């Protein structure tokens, strides 16, 4: 597509009217490229493989950059396994802004996927999400959790 636009723009023998039209076409194409790139912004999947300490212990994934600055956010989680026959609670935590944390997803076991949807307005720069994992106060062992997540 861009080759066609560039060839059209640089044809010889232009008159002033054709040149103005070509500038408008090229400007529109660049605007669509920039706007389309923003609409498609999403992070790649961030893997986690963490041990959640016993007796109501907490563990955290690495952070995933939130590329959208405001609007409808999605945090997608593909949780593969929770060690043994145990379950954990999971939530997403944002590094800044109001309403930084999602609600807890309770009793997460093996092979579970879900998405949190949020409508957040923030100004300025992008932020980061991480997942927080917690086990029950009665869990006597460290529990391994594995999976991946991303935010848009």
Image (cartoon, rainbow, N blue to C red):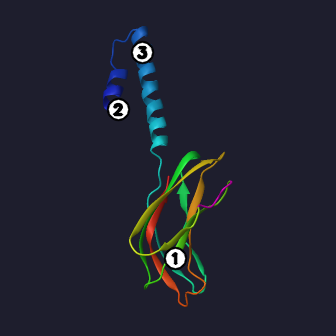
* Badge 2 density bin: few <14, some 14–19, many ≥20, Cα 10 Å: few
Q: Earlier in the sequence, mark 2 or mark 3?
A: 2
Judge by depth and name the residue closer to the eye, 85 or 143.
85
Task: Name which residue lies at 60% across and 81% down.
Answer: 57
- The answer to whether residue 107 is left or right of residue 21 is right
Image coordinates for residue 70, horizontal then vertical, percent: 59, 45
Is 61 magenta? The answer is: no
Task: Name which residue lies at 56% across and 80% down.
Answer: 135
Magenta-highlighted residues:
98-102
Q: Which of the numbered marks, if any, corresponds to residue 4? A: none
Looking at the picture, does residue 68 appear above or below residue 133?
above
* Badge 1 density bin: few <14, some 14–19, many ≥20, Cα 10 Å: many
Q: Nearer the viewer, mark 2 or mark 1?
A: 1
Question: For mark 1, what is the residue?
Answer: 88
Task: Name which residue lies at 41% across and 18% down.
Answer: 22
Instruction: Give the CA separation, mark 2 to mark 3.
Output: 16 Å
Image coordinates for residue 35, horizontal then vertical, percent: 48, 36
Question: For mark 3, what is the residue?
Answer: 21
Do the residues bearing badges 2 and 1 touch, measured as CB atoms within 8 Å?
no
Image coordinates for residue 59, horizontal then vertical, percent: 57, 76
């Amino acid at each position: 597509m861009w080759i066609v636009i560039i060839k059209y723009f640089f044809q010889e023998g232009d008159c002033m009217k054709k040149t103005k039209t070509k500038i408008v076409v090229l400007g529109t194409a660049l605007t669509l490229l920039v706007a389309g790139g923003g609409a498609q912004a999403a992070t790649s999947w961030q893997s986690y493989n963490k041990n959640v300490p016993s007796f109501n212990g907490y563990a955290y994934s690495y952070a995933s950059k939130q590329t959208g600055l405001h609007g409808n956010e999605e945090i997608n989680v593909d949780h593969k396994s929770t060690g043994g026959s145990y379950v954990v609670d999971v939530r997403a935590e944002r590094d800044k802004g109001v309403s930084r944390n999602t609600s807890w997803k309770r009793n997460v076991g093996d092979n579970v996927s879900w998405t949190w949807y949020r409508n957040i307005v923030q100004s300025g720069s992008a932020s980061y999400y991480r997942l927080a994992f917690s086990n029950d106060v009665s869990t006597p062992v460290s529990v391994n959790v594995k999976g991946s997540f991303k935010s848009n």
